[in-house]
Amino acid sequence: MSTLVSHPHVTPVSARLAEGLAARGHLAGYFTGLAFAGVGWRARLANALASIRPVIRNRIVGALPADKLRTFSAVEVVARIGARAAASARLPIGAYDALFVAHDWAVAASRWPSDTATIYAYEDGARRTFERAARQGIARVWDLPTPDHRTAERIFREEHRRWPDAALGPPHTEPAWKLRRKEAELALADKISVASAFTRRSLERTDVRAPIVVAPYGFPVEAFAPRDRAPEGRFMVISVGSHDLRKGTPYLLEAWKRAALPDAELRLIGPLRLAKPFLDRYAGLFTHLPPMPRAALGRHYAEADLLVFPTLGDGFGLVIQEAMCTATPVLTTTSSGGPECITDGVDGWIVPPRDIDALAERLRAAAADRDGTRAFGLRARARAERWTWRDATASAIAALEL
């Protein structure tokens, strides 16, 4: 009996799960958006295009048999174009919602392999697919990659009260139709897969009845090689991802200001979603780089002494693993996948969320002992090599009984 994995666009998590199931002969199909199998003329074309636009490389599913890959390329393209048109018309639907809803409808209306015994689908893209599966008596696994929406909204409300001058607008809330969709997916799920204990705890505060399985992600050791020498020059700290209230960026900026490290640089990489009057208070204390493809991040990880991920609520945080793969140690919070990846004081550091003093103290200690900090990074890489995607996928398949 086999599992059909559905995701609107190729992500490392969904692709590795599909590849692991295929290797065991348990994959009915990987239903996704624009994607390329790892062999044949399409793969050669994708690799050629990737030399011009590196992000295309993320859409190549190298270890998946071509006959197990079902692409809904037109659905993805039309959904993205439609979302742009909706934005121009000031309609309240973004590219993410358009893509996930359209993909869900397409999968629900498509022909499924006859041996499909389980559907594995992701939050916001599973409702119609799960409804059909329930009618046919097919088991349903719901992957929740982020904390429960109630937890996320609570965090936004609290942070707006704490940092009123940092917010770009009112606290984020999901539209009612989307909340109904999430609740319907949750009610239809037979099992729930999450990547961290933090996400599990966010669900346990609700009336969830399906079993929750924590399946931490694997380290992308093949994509991020360890650096070959210690960082040189100024003591460098980087933070990668969105920089906003939920990600804890105000706490990092304040901790950096309090730490007052001489000859040091804080580099923020990714969208900066904080109000200018607030950021002006920290003018000159950090540099900002726009979002970039994952393939380009390796150089920045390797140049840094430390990655700081001060999130207040993340389902996991892939940047934690990416940095550790390059032998750059990580300082993060308990509100992430940090506890699944790091042993505090051994191969990285974990502090409570919102603890400015703890962040500042750890920054000072790391800067004062760069050789010791590098040793933490080497142990981080060693840990990554002990839990690759192959290990994580095998563990998830066994735990979810796929």
Image: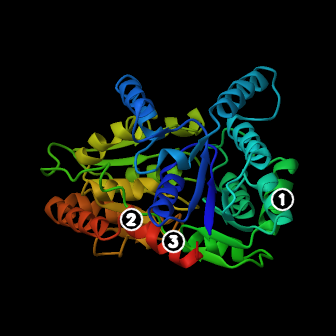
Q: Quadrant location of residue 351? A: bottom left
Mark 2 belongs to which amino acid? Arg
Q: Mark 2: which secondary structure?
A: helix
The mark nearer the N terminus, 1 or 3, is 1
**Which residue is at the front of the view, 388 or 62?**
62
Mark 3 belongs to which amino acid? Ala
Measured Cα–Cα span from mark 1 to mark 3: 24 Å
In the rendered structure, the answer to whether residue 206 lies left or right of residue 356 reads right
The mark nearer the N terminus, 2 or 3, is 2
Q: Mark 1: which secondary structure?
A: helix
The x, y position of residue 82, in whole percent, is 75, 26
Identify the disc placed on residue 131.
Answer: 1
Residue at the spot of label 2 = 390
Mark 1 belongs to which amino acid? Glu
Q: Quadrant location of residue 131? A: bottom right
The x, y position of residue 228, in whole percent, is 13, 50
Q: Quadrant of the N terminus?
A: bottom right
> Can I make out residue 374 in this image?
yes
Measured Cα–Cα span from mark 1 to mark 2: 31 Å
Q: Is residue 9 above or below residue 363?
A: above
